[in-house]
Image: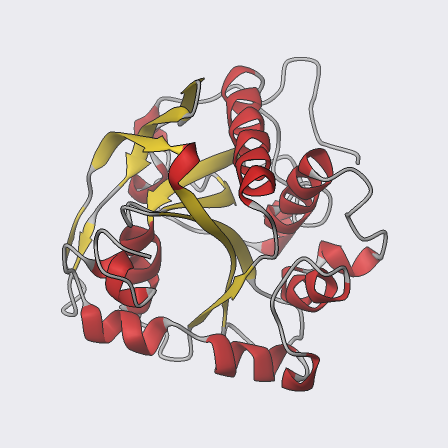
Amino acid sequence: MSVLRSARGPELQPESAYHVTQRGLPHIAIDGTRATITHLRDGIYLPDRSYELRSITQTVDLAEMTNVHFMLNGGWGAIRGVAHAMVCFEFADSKNVVLSIEGLLPHDGKYSVQAGLRRTYPLRNLWQSEADSILSRAYSSNSSIQIAMFELVMTQREAVAFFRSAAARTNELHENPEWYHVVRNSCSTNIARIVDDAFPGQRTRSARYLAPGYLPELFARKGLARIDEADGDVSRLMDRYDVLPLAREIGAADDFSARLHGRTLHGV
C-alpha cells in the first residue's frame, strides 16, 4: 500500500496549532499482556454540547480483551461510502478504547476534501475512551449523524494480534509522521493495512475499501464481521446497527460501555 511519506515526513507543529480535540501525540507501550496508552482522550460530553476535554494514560490487559468492533460514523450526505471508520477494543472491565485514524486539522477545525488530496493534514492515530468517541459525536449539531457498530469475528488471540498491529502503527506514526490523504492514506486504508498486518491475506483487494462506508459489507464477505447479509446496503446497515440512540440515553455515566454492550461491570 502506498503511503504519503516524504524524506522527512510532515514537520509537526506545536500541539496548540491543531484542533483542541486532536491534541496529544499517542504512544503505546506493551509489556507482556499489559498495554499502556499515553494521550488517551477521555472527555466528558453533555447534551447541552458543553464538554471537558481530558487526556489520560490508561493501561489495559490484552488477556482480558473480549471483542473487537468496527465502527462507522456516517450521516453526512447522500453519497454512498462517505463515512469515518474506527475500531473499538472491548475489555472485560468495560474500559474500552477506540482507535480513530484522522488527519490533524488546524486549530479552527476546518477541513476540506480538496485539502485532503494534498499534503495538508498530518496523519494521526487518535485513541479515545469509548464514551469519549461516541458521545463527542452523539451531541453533534448534525442531527443525521449515526454511529454503527459491528462485531468482528476473531479469536482472542487474533484480537490481541489486531491490537498489537494497531499499536505498532500508532508508534510508527509517533516516530515517523506521514501525510493524511483522503484516498491513499485515510482511516479506511489504514484499517485495511492493520487488518492485513494482523491477518496476512485477509484484506480485500477491491478498490471499495478506499471508501469507509463499504468496509462493513467487505468485512462481512471476508467472514470478518457479524453482519447478516439480509441487512442489505450501507444505509440499512447504518440504521440497524446505529448505537447513538442508546448512547444518548445512557449519557456521561461511569458505566457507559458496560451499559452500551449490555454487560455488568465485572461480567461478560
- Residue found at x 77% / y 48%: 203
Residue 218 shows up from this direction: yes
Residue 135, given in percent of the width and then of the height, sits at: 28, 61
Q: Quadrant of residue 139?
A: bottom left
- Residue found at x 44% / y 75%: 242
Q: Residue furthest right?
A: 205
Q: Quadrant of residue 177?
A: top right
Q: Quadrant of residue 195?
A: top right
The image quadrant where one finds the C terminus is bottom left
Residue sitting nearer the eye, 218 or 9:
218
**Looking at the picture, does residue 128 appear above or below residue 61?**
below
Residue 103, given in percent of the width and then of the height, sits at: 52, 41
Residue 263, given in percent of the width and then of the height, sits at: 28, 63
On the picture, is 185 further left or further right than 206?
A: left
- Residue found at x 37% / y 35%: 18
Residue 78 shows up from this direction: no
Residue sitting nearer the eye, 89 or 15:
89
Residue 7, given in percent of the width and then of the height, sits at: 70, 14
- Residue found at x 61% / y 27%: 178
